[in-house]
Amino acid sequence: MNKTKLDKDEAALLKSYEADEWRSAQKSKTEVARYRKYAQATFRKDKRVNIRISEKDLVGIQKRAIEEGIPYQTLMSSILHKYLAGTLVERRS
């Protein structure tokens, strides 16, 4: 792997991984069921919404979706879901 293309955080994660510092997290049945419920709620699409957004924002969402390998509508839905669940984390550049 070419380490020169990694940012500071990525390099730290790789170093930690290569030092065998990572351990598998044991998930309880309750925790697995909880996340399964979240996933089902996230992916159930039973309502249609039309919104107007700037072309710049739409292009940005579409580019990010391509990077993630998902449709842009799915990304938008995921962002809204995370925001409402209180799990959307803002990263400052």
Image (cartoon, rainbow, N blue to C red):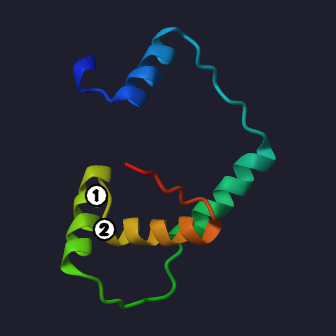
Name the quarter where the N terminus is drawn: top left
Q: Mark 1 or mark 2, which is nearer to you?
A: 1
Identify which amino acid the numbered label 1 is placed on. Answer: Arg
In 3D space, how far apart are the residues under numbered discs 1 and 2 (Cα atoms)? 8 Å
Kindly identify which residue carries mark 1: 64
Q: Tell me if label 1 and label 2 are in contact, CB under 8 Å.
A: yes
Q: Residue at x 28, y 57 (%)?
A: 64
Along the line of sight, which residue is nearer the eye, 29 or 19?
19
Judged from the image, the secondary structure of the residue bearing numbered disc 2 is helix
Q: Is residue 33 visible?
A: yes
Amino acid type at image mark 2: Tyr
Q: Residue at x 20, y 69 (%)?
A: 59
* Foreground of the two, 54 or 50: 54
* Total labels drawn: 2
Q: In the image, which disc is placed on residue 34?
A: none
Pointer 1 or 2: first along the chain: 1
